[in-house]
Image (cartoon, rainbow, N blue to C red):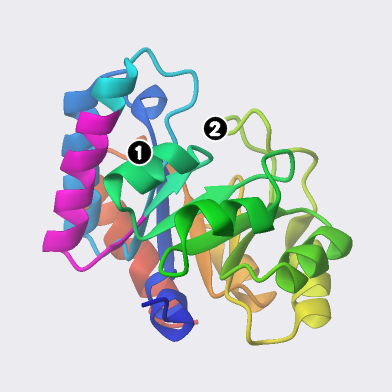
């Protein structure tokens, strides 16, 4: 059953990761995720872009990550690949502006799976809201090298405009170039959480990085 309030609570620290963030190693990806979940990551998104894995290997990686999420009561999303999300019975699927329409996604995944959408403008956010999404990923907040398709940064000011437009019922996570140093700005602009890639995946200790981000979210 989709529960937006639970999703909002779990989105505080939202970790986005794929093998491209871990030297194209499935083993290192699993190790990094396990450490991040110990540190308090509430939502995990498998985003395996430019993967060197076969479809079956991606599925096997997804199974491992999903199991870790279940053990840590973490929400598990799959990025873009609706068929993989269905095959894994993920908690949610996150799609971009150039992917299939929301009605097509909902028809494929059914009523139980969360749907998240990327939005960089008020118009995109309102369209997503009207289409019945469960959450939106807003960005890019800051310049980032972790996500080649992130677009020009809109900053916390852009997120604040989107929050005002969609109201307070729709969960929002900011994404793009977010670090320990600037996460507070994103939360202050109206985000329910921060989506993180390199600030956790490239940290000396992913567990400690996740813990530090969780402290920021809790004390905003």
Residue 70 in picture, x, y percent from top left:
17, 61
Q: Secondary structure at mark 1?
A: helix
Residue at figure coordinates x 58%, y 68% from the top left: 135
Specify few, some or many for label 1: CA neighbours under 10 Å numbering under 14, 14-19, or 20 or more. many
Front one among 34 and 129: 129
- Majority SS type along the magenta span: helix
Q: Mark 2–mark 1 contact, CB under 8 Å?
A: yes
Q: In the visual, does 91 lie left or right of 28?
A: right
Which of the two discs, 2 and 1, labels the residue nearer the N terminus?
Answer: 2
**Which stretch did the figure color magenta?**
59-76
State the residue position of label 1. 201
Depicted 37 relative to depicted 28: above or below: below
Q: Secondary structure at mark 2?
A: loop
Mark identifier at residue 111: none
Q: In the visual, does 57 lie left or right of 101?
A: left
Residue 187 in picture, x, y percent from top left:
59, 73
Residue 19 in picture, x, y percent from top left:
34, 26
Mark identifier at residue 146: 2
């Amino acid at each position: 059953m989709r529960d937006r309030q639970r999703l909002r609570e779990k989105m505080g620290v939202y970790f986005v990761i794929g093998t491209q963030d871990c030297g194209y190693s499935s083993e290192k990806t699993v190790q990094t995720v396990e450490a991040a979940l110990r540190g308090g990551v509430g939502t995990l998104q498998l985003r395996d872009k430019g993967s060197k894995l076969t479809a079956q290997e991606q599925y096997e990686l997804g199974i491992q990550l999903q199991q870790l999420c279940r053990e840590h009561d973490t929400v598990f999303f799959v990025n873009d690949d609706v068929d993989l999300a269905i095959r894994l019975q993920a908690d949610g699927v996150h799609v971009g502006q150039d992917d299939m329409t929301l009605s097509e996604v909902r028809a494929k995944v059914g009523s139980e799976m969360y749907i998240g959408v990327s939005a960089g403008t008020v118009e995109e956010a309102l369209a997503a809201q009207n289409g019945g999404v469960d959450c939106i990923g807003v960005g890019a907040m800051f310049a980032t090298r972790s996500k080649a398709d992130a677009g020009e940064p809109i900053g916390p000011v852009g997120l604040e405009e989107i929050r005002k437009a969609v109201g307070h019922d729709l969960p929002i996570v900011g994404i793009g170039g977010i670090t320990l140093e600037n996460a507070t700005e994103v939360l202050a602009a109206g985000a329910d959480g921060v989506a993180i890639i390199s600030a956790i995946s490239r940290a000396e200790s992913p567990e400690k990085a996740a813990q530090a981000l969780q402290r920021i979210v809790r004390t905003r």
